[in-house]
Amino acid sequence: MSRYATLEKKNNVVKQPVPTFCGIDYAKRFSYITIGDEEGRVLHQGPVPNEVGRLEKFFEQYPKLTIAIEACRGHEWLVDWLRDRKYVVHVGNVYAIKQIAQSRCKTDKIDSQILMELLAKEFLPTTYQPTRKERDYRELVRWRAQLVKSQTKYKLRVHALLDKENKGIASPFSAAGREALKQVELIGQKQAILKESMEVIEFIEQQIHEQDLKIRKLAKSNPDVYRLKHIPGFDVLTAMIFVAEVGDVKRFRSAEQLAAFTGLVPRVYASGGKMNTGRITKTGPGLLRQMLVQSAWAAIRCCPVLRSRHASISRRRGKKIAIIAIARMLAEIAYHVYLEKTPFDEMRLGAGLVRAVF
């Protein structure tokens, strides 16, 4: 028995458990909260409404906590609220937690307790929590991407309407094409649908233009975007998407790790001492991956080194794999530019700054 424990027993002092760890299972209306001591023993469990006043009253009882909350839809505001009040908050990786917990029963109570216990045992798998500024950038670039997607849907609808009556126009959305559309007459409701579709397309175009102005304005005050946009194939939009989706580049230990984050690396299958590669993983942000591939096509037109690398890989593996390899190279180049805060230097390409494993 320790001297401390002996003194406690002699003086009939019972050491009170200290609230130390907290697990929060977040939902839209309520958060189920489990409070535990330094050993991970449960001291309190129960739901708390997601109302600032009710949360304030609850957490006043526990001024010093280390908190775990599972990453889910809408959790960001609660993380910000807690951090603003000086709590240490860890955001748990939902997929990794499921693999570790392997619980047959899933309830809010069980989930919050698992989070608390993993945190207490220093075994909580965490995920990156973007800053408010990074989330604001993401909202902007993702909203623009959604507008472009909607615009494409309506343009395809216009093409379909014209094709149904064999009145297709080569470029119906150019200035000349739009004038030609005004002379087109379709049967029945198709005429009204064509007119309304064009009105929607014009409205979306204006919205995209407004988002582009916002992006350019933000880019002017961001030196990272300025440096990234000078990478071959990059422009202001691509640079802004890279900054928004990557966030803190220091969380990646290497350029290869960032490339894996973009989903531009091949799957690896190893069995019986043999290793084979398959299709790319396509993990991570789809918008970032899409823009890197688009930038790769532009890069091979303007950068002789990348064009030569693309031609070399194409001869061995084909054009599709080659363009993915170039996209990955651009991701690795962007990593170094972003991390080192240095301008792009084409001479480093020839020196073997980046490579492609395809």
Image (cartoon, helix red, strand yellow):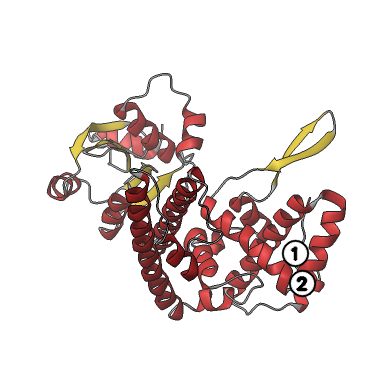
Q: How many marks?
A: 2
Cα gap from disc 1 to disc 2, whole angstroms: 7 Å
Residue closer to the observer: 328 or 98? 328
Instruction: Find residue 272 and report its horizontal and vertical position in percent.
Output: 84, 28
Secondary structure of residue under mark 2: helix
Residue 220: mark in rendering? none
Q: Residues within 10 Å of mark 2 (few under 14, many from 20)?
A: some
- Amino acid on which disc 1 is placed: Val
Please report the residue visible at 60 percent of the width from the left and 53 percent of the height from the top.
262
Q: Is residue 125 above or below residue 154?
A: above
Give percent across and percent down for residue 339. 59, 70
Q: To which residue does mark 2 refer?
A: 349
Do labels 1 and 2 touch, CB within 8 Å? yes
Q: Which quadrant of the figure has residue 145?
A: bottom left
Location of mark 1 (residue): 354
Report x, y in % for residue 298.
66, 67
Q: Secondary structure at mark 1?
A: loop
Mark 1 packing: few (<14 Cα in 10 Å), some, or many (20+)?
some
Asked if residue 30 is positioned above or below residue 56 in the image, the reply reads above
Residue 146 appears left or right of 356 = left
Q: Amino acid at mark 2?
A: Leu
Of residues 27 and 20, the one nearer the viewer is 27
Residue 186 percent across, percent down from the top left: 40, 49
